[in-house]
Image: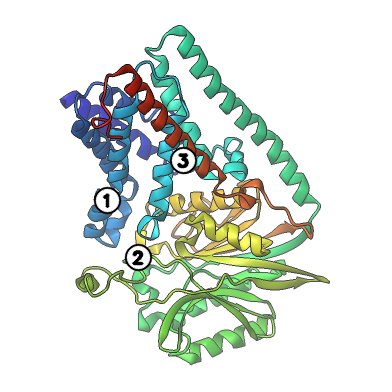
Amino acid sequence: MKISFFLSLCTGLLLSLGFLPSRFFWVFSWFGFLPLFSALVKVNSKLKAFFLGYLAGLLFWLITVYWLIHVSLLGLILLSLYLSFYFGIFGLFFYIFFKKEFKDIFFIPSFWVILEYIRSKLFTGFGWALLGYSQTLNLTLIQIADLFGAEALSFLIMATNLTVFFGSFALPSQRLKAISVCLGMLIFSLLYGNYKKIAIKNFYSLGIPFKVAVVQANIPQFLKWDSSKKDFILQRHFTLTKEVLKDNPEIIVWPEASLPVVAEEEPIYYLRLLDFIKGIKKPLLLGLVTKEDTLYYNCAEFISSDAEPLKRYHKLHLVPFGEYIPLKKIFYFLENIAPIGDFSKGKEYSLFEIKKDSDIFKFSVLICFEDIFPELSYRFVKKGADFLINITNDAWFKESPASFQHLTSSVFRAIENRRYLIRSANTGISCFISPVGEITSKIENHLGKDIFIEGAISQNIFLRKTKYLSFYTRYPKLFVSFCIITVLYGIIKRYAERKRDKKYTVNSFVP
């Protein structure tokens, strides 16, 4: 068991490397499960199999989201303990169903995809660090996300791990079949990715240029709501905005909660903002906290170049234990442990409109971590969004991989929906993501540092009057449905085989 523990921990470590901001670490995901698989085939009980999977998950999550310690040590521990259950369940499933004569490389990867999907939905969902997100910098391969979403990458990585492991002891005919199927999926993904990158770039190159400017003010979290720093914070946003006026942008974007007050409680600052917009004569989208009918909202507001407030979007998906306390009567004590807001969630998928010459384009806003939920993005696109904007504040997590991990979600949302996605983040990463998932420009200093620096940049995006809806945007749940059917079919098939061979009774079969 000591060796099994070691192998399990190796998997947790290898998988976590894929979520560090390195150009080469994505490769570890393609063989990261091999140590865990080796341990699982040697154990002799379901409990041990669950524990080995759980141990791998625990190390993976403690390394991957260690930055939560900057907000709450208890939160880091509890979240990691919960998320590790999915690894434990996977270990148990693998132990029950994987046999040396196993030939189906679709079955177990499908179950992994289902687990990630459940994790992304259950208890409001935590779709962070999906296995497929580790391939964010593998630009050609991830183009298949416009067919089947990030789940397709998770499936492909797991299938490759399984094929390599299975091929190490399978019969030559079995090995050849497994390798052929896996290699076929990889070749298709690469060929499709090369074709799609060219096709999508050509499609948008014929579009109407539309210049957007983003501001990254770099306000440390301990200053964000310091009453003595309100003027300083507002002035820094003003100064950075003036720097990009020379580029003549169509719209300027500020980060989440960039107005350093609750707009209705201290209107003098809001009026100063409107006066500033009158002076620069440019439309502004910004994040701010508002109070409406005694309720507080984390929202985005679009203000015209004439300083007329046009529309607000109230955040739809709040962060549990961050922006509100679920079951507050039970968990009331958490208010004294971590900084938790008391926000209400919005009810409407609001779209904003902006005019370019005689054309009107629509865009939507994803606030904070809303970009980790694919359903928000594809619903906005289906409603008519021509491009997406993510405004966020990751200052809570200091100089850690959190900003990069957050960026990976935005990259996949851009590819899945084939839309430009523009990010304005208080401390970074603020950038422009093309419809093929390429980061075309970002705010960085002369050393290449892109977080905890201040700056502002502008760039043209290209918008088409011809609306393009990807296969994934049209049928976002198709691949997950395929995985569910695959797993159910596999379970029924194996149940029938065991019953036929009279090796197990019906009562002893516990999937």
Mark earlier in primary sequence (3, 1): 1
Relative vertical location of residue 40 with respect to residue 208 in this rendering, above or below: above
Residue 374 is left or right of residue 48, and the answer is: right
Query: Which label number is shown at residue 108?
Result: none
Q: Residues within 10 Å of mark 1 (few under 14, many from 20)?
A: few
Give the residue pinned by disc 1.
Answer: 82
Q: Position of residue 67 (x, y in %)?
A: 32, 54
Residue 133 is left or right of residue 377, and the answer is: left
Give the residue pinned by disc 3.
Answer: 484
x 77%, y 45%: residue: 202
Amino acid type, residue under disc 1 in the picture: Tyr
Cα separation between marks 3 and 1:
23 Å
Amino acid type, residue under disc 2 in the picture: Pro
x 35%, y 33%: residue: 14
x 57%, y 42%: residue: 148
**Viewer-closest of 32 and 20:** 32
Give the secondary structure at mark 2.
Answer: loop
Mark earlier in primary sequence (2, 1): 1
Q: Nearer the viewer, mark 2 or mark 3?
A: 3
Snapshot colouring: rainbow
**Viewer-closest of 382 and 243:** 382
Give the secondary structure at mark 3.
Answer: helix
**Viewer-closest of 87 and 92:** 92
Residue 331 seen in this snapshot: yes
Amino acid type, residue under disc 3 in the picture: Ile
x 29%, y 29%: residue: 96
Give the residue pinned by disc 2.
Answer: 320
Give the secondary structure at mark 1.
Answer: helix
Mark earlier in primary sequence (2, 3): 2
